[in-house]
Image (cartoon, rainbow, N blue to C red):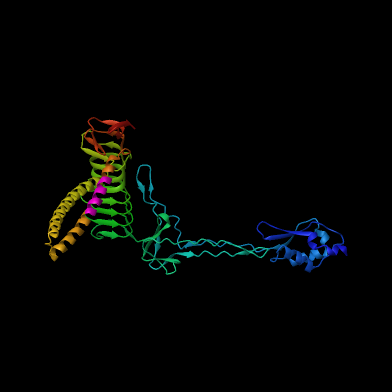
């Protein structure tokens, strides 16, 4: 009976896993005559604070035959692991994976309009996407009874763009109009209506003003106007028409402007040729020729196809004009300007005129206030003069703010005039006499044909370098 006086904890110990989800019993001492009951074994568990997930069947096995597990580490309790919540996600009703598909540009600069952007048509009120909510994490419980924390899932967010509406709970997104779904940068979802014309834009169709993209499967005739918040795609030609797109304009055949109308795009204008037209865009890509036209591009004008000819007119670009041939053997006047945006030049002239007017008004206001101050000093200010002085002081504050704003903008533009170091003109084949190259503040007249040359600023002048 002596061994019964020895506590059971002398014979066994309990260890925990690092995550406290498992408890193991192991004998550290053993005697053949050792016997114990459930109550004694539970006392040992209690001393180690093991209260959750206890395997009583295993404890009964140990009581019946402790010798069997003498040399082993036996799992006697298993906790409840924490369960992390699932992240929320957006369930789309349409496969938007093909939205990056654009018309393919072939090696010769032409555009293959057979490969066009996939259109996802949607009706007003139709479900576009819904937010599947994240789930909460479920805490676990260690074998010692303490709670084991779990992470909640992250919520997804719907990103509404144009012409879509959300429900009050911000769970579902619906189309506000009939149109096509497009996914723009940062995964914003928009619905744009597409206006499609299977033929020419003429008197049967009239002018088009649309808040989406316009597709013309024909030509646009002289005198008509197309305005689009998206892109304009034309499989035929454009005559003396006005085109205005916030996105890009792609013209499969070419532009024959007859010196009428303007074609403007927020992004890119692509065409096989441009003749007698005015073009304004971020970048202009032409595969064949630009003839007797005015081109204004905030970034670049590229005309390097099989013909790649620029002759006549004025080509202006913020960064680069690249062509195969500039001018011709008849010395046709051709102006190429880079490094300064034409819009900035015009803005600078207008700002200087505005500044002169504002300065004159400030002077007049100051003189009037001096007279009123003199009257106030001699006590001759009637109520009407007091009101006039208050009004003039208010006017002066407004004029001073306007003066400051104009001066800041003038300084900003003048600084950009100096920053033309990266601007360049590249000629793959020949630039002829009659051409004029302007970079920033500097001008170079071409007197003799030059082949394979790059023009850029160096040491305060326009330098010519071999291409």
The secondary structure that most of the magenta stretch takes on is helix
Query: Which one is in front, 324 or 92?
Result: 92
Image quadrant where one finds the C terminus: top left
State which region is magenta. 400-412
**Which image quarter: residue 462?**
top left
Q: Is residue 182 left or right of residue 409?
A: right
Q: Is residue 378 magenta?
A: no
Image quadrant where one finds the N terminus: bottom right
Query: Which one is in front, 332 or 343?
Result: 343
How far across and how far down the image is residue 54, in percent?
72, 65
Q: Is residue 410 magenta?
A: yes
How far across and how far down the image is residue 238, in percent?
26, 51
Q: Which residue, as the protein is rendered here, is positioned at the far front?
A: 378
Q: Is residue 153 left or right of residue 26?
A: left
**Which image quarter: residue 394?**
bottom left
Residue 29 vertical position relative to residue 344 in the rendered view, above or below: below
Residue 221 vertical position relative to residue 303 in the rendered view, above or below: below
Tally of numbered tags: 0
**From where the camera sits, is residue 431 visible?**
yes
Query: Which one is in front, 94 or 236?
Result: 94
**From where the camera sits, is residue 259 visible?**
no
How far across and how far down the image is residue 271, in percent?
31, 47
How far across and how far down the image is residue 305, in percent?
33, 40
């Amino acid at each position: 009976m002596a061994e019964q006086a020895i506590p059971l904890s002398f014979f066994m110990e309990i260890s925990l896993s690092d995550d406290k989800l498992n408890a193991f019993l192991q004998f550290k001492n053993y005697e053949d005559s050792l016997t114990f009951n459930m109550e004694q074994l539970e006392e040992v568990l209690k001393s180690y604070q093991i209260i959750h997930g206890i395997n009583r069947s295993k404890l009964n096995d140990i009581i019946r035959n402790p010798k069997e597990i003498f040399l082993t580490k036996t799992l006697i309790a298993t906790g409840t692991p924490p369960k992390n919540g699932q992240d929320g996600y957006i369930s789309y009703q349409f496969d938007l994976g093909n939205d990056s598909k654009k018309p393919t540009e072939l090696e010769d600069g032409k555009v293959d309009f057979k490969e066009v952007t996939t259109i996802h048509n949607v009706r007003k009120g139709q479900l576009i996407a819904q937010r599947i909510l994240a789930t909460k994490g479920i805490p676990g419980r260690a074998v010692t009874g303490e709670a084991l924390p779990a992470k909640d899932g992250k919520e997804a967010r719907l990103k509404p763009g144009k012409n879509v509406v959300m429900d009050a709970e911000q769970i579902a997104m619906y189309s506000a109009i009939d149109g096509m779904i497009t996914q723009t940068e940062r995964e914003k979802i928009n619905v744009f209506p597409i206006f499609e014309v299977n033929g020419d834009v003429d008197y049967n169709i009239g002018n088009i003003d649309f808040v989406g993209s316009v597709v013309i499967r024909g030509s646009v005739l002289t005198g008509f106007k197309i305005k689009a918040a998206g892109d304009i795609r034309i499989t035929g030609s454009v005559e003396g028409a006005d085109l205005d797109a916030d996105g890009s304009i792609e013209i499969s055949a070419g532009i024959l402007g007859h010196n009428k109308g303007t074609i403007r795009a927020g992004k890119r204008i692509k065409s096989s040729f441009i003749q007698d037209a005015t073009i304004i865009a971020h970048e202009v890509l032409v595969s064949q020729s630009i003839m007797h036209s005015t081109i204004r591009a905030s970034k670049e004008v590229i005309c390097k196809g099989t013909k790649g000819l620029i002759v006549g007119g004025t080509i202006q670009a913020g960064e680069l004009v690249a062509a195969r041939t500039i001018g011709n053997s008849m010395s046709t006047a051709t102006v190429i300007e880079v490094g300064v945006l034409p819009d900035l030049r015009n803005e600078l002239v207008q700002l200087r005129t505005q500044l002169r007017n504002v300065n004159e008004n400030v002077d007049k206001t100051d003189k009037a206030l001096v007279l009123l101050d003199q009257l106030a000093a001699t006590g001759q200010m009637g109520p009407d003069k007091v009101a006039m002085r208050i009004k003039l002081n208010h006017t002066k504050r407004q004029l001073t703010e306007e003066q400051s704003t104009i001066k800041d903008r003038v300084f900003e533009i003048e600084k950009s005039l100096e920053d033309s170091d990266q601007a360049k003109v590249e000629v793959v084949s020949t630039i002829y006499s009659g051409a004029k190259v302007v970079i920033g503040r500097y001008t170079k007249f071409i007197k003799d044909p030059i082949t394979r040359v790059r023009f850029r600023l160096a040491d305060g002048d326009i330098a010519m370098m071999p291409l």
